[in-house]
Amino acid sequence: MKQSALCLALCLLPGLAWADPPDSTSSRAAALAVDQAAAAASIRGLEDQTAQDGNQLANLQGAQAQSQQRLIQAEADLARLLPLMQRLSSAPASTLLAAPLPPGQAVRGIALLRGVAQAIANQARTVQTENAQLAALITAAQSSQQKLVQSATIQAQAEAEIAKQIADARQAEMAAVDTDAAKITARLQAANKLSNLNEAVTNLVPPAASPAKLTMGAGGAPVAGSVVQRFGAATLAGPATGISYGAAPGALVTSPCAGTVMFAAPFPSYGLMVIADCGHGDSVILAGMSKLDVAQGQRLAHGQPIGTMQGFNPKEPAHQPRLYVELRQNGAPVDPTQWLNGGLNGGHSG
């Protein structure tokens, strides 16, 4: 199943071969950006599979840890009763009668000890059950980990082809950058006016007199994975002004809009970050990548790869890197959930 998916993804790439170079460098760069977006979309299924396998392994490892704790507790409870269990198993009556008790109390004590013996037997069965469950979880986790490694390997093979395509297109795309946008960013950086995110967005993205309404689902998820923190969720810094994805390791991060890269560099407290001007007063912020594939002033196609998440680590197979995403309208954060909850085609509506 996965091999056929890889074949489909890789076989699609030659079909995305570029036409003869047009006269305009900008036109050629735009065509290359669209090719990259199509290539990234073609392997999203592979990245989704890696994310699902990672989630499954994380869940199994969590269940395994809980089962291990229950087993440790059950064994400890059983160990405390073991000496009594050994004496009761050989001579329950004489064990009690050895104590200087009145006959009535001795009879009641025998009945009580028989109840204790039953409790000990039940505890022993609990230990056996937890042992069996733990063994099953360990086996399932090992199988899931092998599946995850296979998924990550197939994904990496497909992404290597796109990385080569991006590298090949780099010269043409950088020759067609919006020089005015690049100069604005350079000037603000030199003036140290890009240390605060709010100020950065305000200075980099021009407002619109009447912002257009974003179409539901038009952005598309920028990375394979699932939302792990929603807009408005409680954080140490207050309600979250964006959403966070638990991403597939090594997944490509794609632009949820067509537009212009206004910032692409490390940013205080955010790591590697991209701010893109989507037009109509809208901007999108994506942070948490381990590698960037775009630069200031670069024109973006919708769905074009802009960076890559941290790669698969065999020592932490269930680890999911996090991508932070904000949507802003005239500089104010808005909930991007509905805009991102869709496919890769769309845009603004009036």
Image: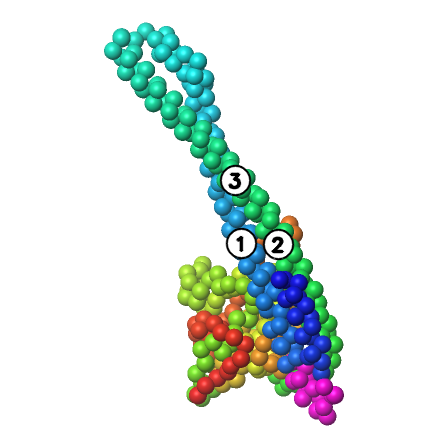
Q: Which residue is mark 2?
A: 147
Chain part drawn in magenta: 19-33
Specify the amino acid type for callout 1.
Answer: Gln
Pick the front one: 155 or 257: 155
Q: Earlier in the sequence, mark 1 or mark 2?
A: 1
**Which residue was labeled with disc 1?**
56
Q: Quadrant of the C terminus?
A: bottom left
Residue beneath the point at 58% across and 53% down: 318
Q: Residue at x 38, y 22 (%)?
A: 117
Which residue is drawn at the image coordinates 69% and 86% (left, top)? Answer: 28
Q: Are marks 1 and 2 in contact (CB under 8 Å)?
A: yes
Residue 264 image-quadrant placement:
bottom right
Quadrant into which the N terminus falls: bottom right
In x, y percent, where is residue 270? Answer: 56, 65
Residue at mark 1 to residue at mark 3: CA–CA distance = 16 Å
Q: Residue 63: horizontal and vertical position, in percent?
A: 49, 46
Amino acid identity at mark 3: Leu
Residue 160, label in figure: none
What distance separates the C-alpha of mark 1 from that of mark 2? Answer: 10 Å
| SS at mark 3 in the image | helix
